[in-house]
């Protein structure tokens, strides 16, 4: 009788252990994939509901996290800044008997748009003459790239020149489409500005002209956009502009000119103490985190890092100060004692190195704080639904059940986040794949892992 009672008491635990053992076996089988003849993976699966580690493979191996770095940056930002924080871009004026001056001050709002610039210009009375427009970039230092960023990523929109004053993410969008055979293709560049020049030497539907190329003369720090080659279909690309603050100021002056406002001089300098604020554009931190996580925007992640630094440092703040705050957070709040390297906020740097264990600690920390978790979780891409996970997990049990951050650089494909399983539990997982050339193949393997967790 006693033995039967013991068995009855143990039965729920025995039944609960069965799917866990099945999951562990399936994950073990997946690690026998031929992918790992040349590549490697760090894999962790944690049952948050039961507070139990379910699977661990090479958890402490250091790997470039790629854009999974943004999960850590966003969690630290929410912890330090709070959900009500804003990124402000301000316009001030000061009038005297002899002059009228404007002062524009930026705080690295990564999402300041052409429309925002027009609204700012509209706050100035029509027809006035501005003696000097002062551009205040004192919020951040003058280093416009992150430590360990790759030099030949320069012309592309995902690697902008960082500045306190950012417009359209420091980049322009170029769209090219063919016209009649043998004629130059049509094109459109937004935002429109005289800050850049377009040289269109491409031809529509002429194979002898070679592949279509749209590129800025970036090796000589020029904002000349060259369109060359054979245009056979609609093509679009984003490229950065050399010197983001200059780009911002040039477009603002053009917006002012549309209102009949004349600007005689431009000077980079601080806002004077007795200037009056006439306009402010306030960007909620939630918008910045959403773009950093959902769309994997590098500029948004770097802006979060600078603003984290600003909570503890006097301006101008630097990325290295932000990295120090993140590193201290990892040691003091996450209890990380091993080696790691934090070089930027976005994961672009070749100097970033994290382990699956570190990333899992961050995910568990976020989950332990209801307010922080609610603000963080909703901005993660959803499998098969949104962001960089929109085209993932289709036809699997993980479809719509995963919220996770993707990461891809050459040779590295990473994924970390949360999965809702069929047993009603919420799982945290980390997959850091490295030493692999085909990101598509790796993603297919990762989706099998997600399917195993969710079913």
Image (cartoon, grey):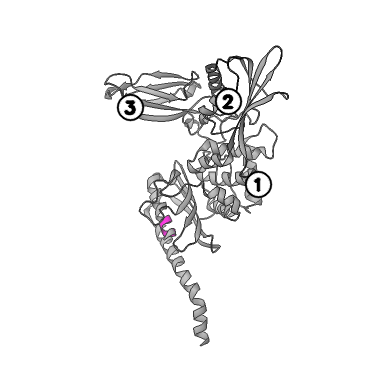
Residue on which the image places disc 3: 211
Q: Nearer the viewer, residue 410 or 196?
A: 196
Residue depth check, mark 3 versus mark 2: number of the one nearer the observer = 2
- Residue density around tag 1, few if under 14, some if 14–19, many if 20 or more, within 10 Å: some
Q: Which mark is residue 446?
A: none
- SS type, badge 1: helix
Q: Magenta stretch: residue 451 in it?
A: yes
Q: In the rendered structure, does residue 447 fall within the stretch colored magenta?
A: no
Report if residue 57 is visible in the image: no
Majority SS type along the magenta span:
helix
Per the rendered image, the range of residues in magenta is 449-453
Seen from the viewer's position, the closer of residues 356 and 237 is 237
- Please state if 205 lies on the left or on the right of 77 as rendered: left
Q: Residue furthest top?
A: 98
Nearer-N-terminus badge (3/2): 2
Which sits in the foreground, 417 or 337? 417
Q: How many marks?
A: 3
Location of residue 271 in the rendering, given as x and y in whole percent from the top left corner: 68, 24
Crowdedness near tag 3: few (<14), some (14–19) or many (≥20) residues, C-alpha within 10 Å: few
The numbered mark, 2 or 1, whose residue comes first in the sequence reads 2
Q: Please give the residue where the numbered disc 1 appears in the rendered image.
A: 328
Quick one: label 2, few (<14), some, or many (20+) residues within 10 Å? many
The residue lying furthest to the bottom in this view is 1
State the residue lying farthest toward the right: 274
Q: Which residue is mark 2?
A: 120
What is the secondary structure assignment of the residue under circle 2? helix
How far is the residue under mark 2 from the one under mark 1?
38 Å
| Whether residue 253 can be seen here | yes
- The span from disc 3 to disc 2 (Cα, nearest Å) is 41 Å
């Amino acid at each position: 009788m006693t033995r039967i009672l013991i068995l009855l008491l143990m039965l729920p635990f025995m039944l609960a252990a069965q799917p866990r053992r099945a999951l562990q076996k399936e994950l073990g089988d997946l690690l026998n994939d031929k992918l790992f003849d040349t590549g490697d993976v760090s894999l962790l699966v944690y049952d948050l509901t039961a507070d139990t580690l379910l699977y661990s493979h090479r958890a402490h191996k250091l790997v470039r996290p790629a854009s999974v770095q943004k999960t850590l940056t966003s969690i630290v930002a929410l912890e330090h800044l709070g959900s009500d924080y804003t990124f402000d871009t301000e316009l001030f004026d000061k009038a005297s008997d002899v002059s009228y001056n404007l002062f524009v001050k930026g705080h690295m709002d990564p999402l300041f748009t052409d429309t925002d610039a027009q609204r700012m210009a509209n706050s100035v009375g029509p027809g006035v003459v501005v003696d000097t427009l002062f551009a205040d970039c004192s919020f951040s230092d003058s280093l416009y790239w992150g430590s360990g960023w790759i030099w030949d990523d320069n012309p592309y929109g995902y690697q902008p020149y960082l500045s306190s004053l950012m417009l359209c993410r420091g980049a322009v969008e170029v769209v090219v489409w063919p016209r009649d055979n043998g004629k130059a293709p049509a094109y459109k560049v937004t935002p429109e500005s005289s800050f850049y020049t377009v040289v269109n030497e491409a031809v529509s539907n002429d194979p002898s002209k070679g592949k279509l190329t749209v590129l800025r003369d970036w090796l000589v720090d020029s904002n000349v956009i060259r369109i060359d080659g054979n245009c056979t279909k609609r093509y679009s690309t984003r490229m950065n502009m050399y010197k983001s603050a200059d780009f911002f100021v040039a477009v603002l002056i053009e917006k002012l000119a549309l209102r009949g406002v004349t600007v005689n001089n431009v000077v980079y300098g601080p806002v004077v103490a007795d200037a009056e604020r006439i306009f402010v554009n306030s960007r909620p931190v939630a918008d910045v985190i959403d773009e950093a996580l959902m769309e994997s925007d590098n500029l948004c992640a770097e802006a979060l890092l600078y603003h984290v630094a600003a909570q503890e440092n006097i301006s101008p703040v630097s990325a290295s100060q932000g990295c120090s705050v993140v590193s201290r957070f990892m040691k003091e709040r996450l209890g990380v004692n091993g080696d790691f390297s934090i070089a930027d906020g976005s994961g672009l740097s070749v100097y970033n190195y994290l382990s699956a264990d570190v990333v899992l600690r961050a995910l568990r920390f976020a989950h332990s704080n209801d307010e922080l978790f609610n603000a963080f979780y909703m901005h993660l891409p959803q499998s098969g639904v949104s962001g960089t996970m929109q085209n993932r997990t289709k036809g699997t049990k993980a479809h719509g059940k995963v919220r996770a951050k993707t990461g891809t650089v050459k040779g590295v494909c990473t994924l970390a986040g949360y999965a809702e399983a069929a047993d009603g539990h919420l799982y945290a997982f980390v997959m850091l794949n490295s030493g692999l050339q085909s990101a598509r193949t790796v993603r297919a393997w990762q989706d099998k892992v997600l399917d195993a967790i969710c079913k």
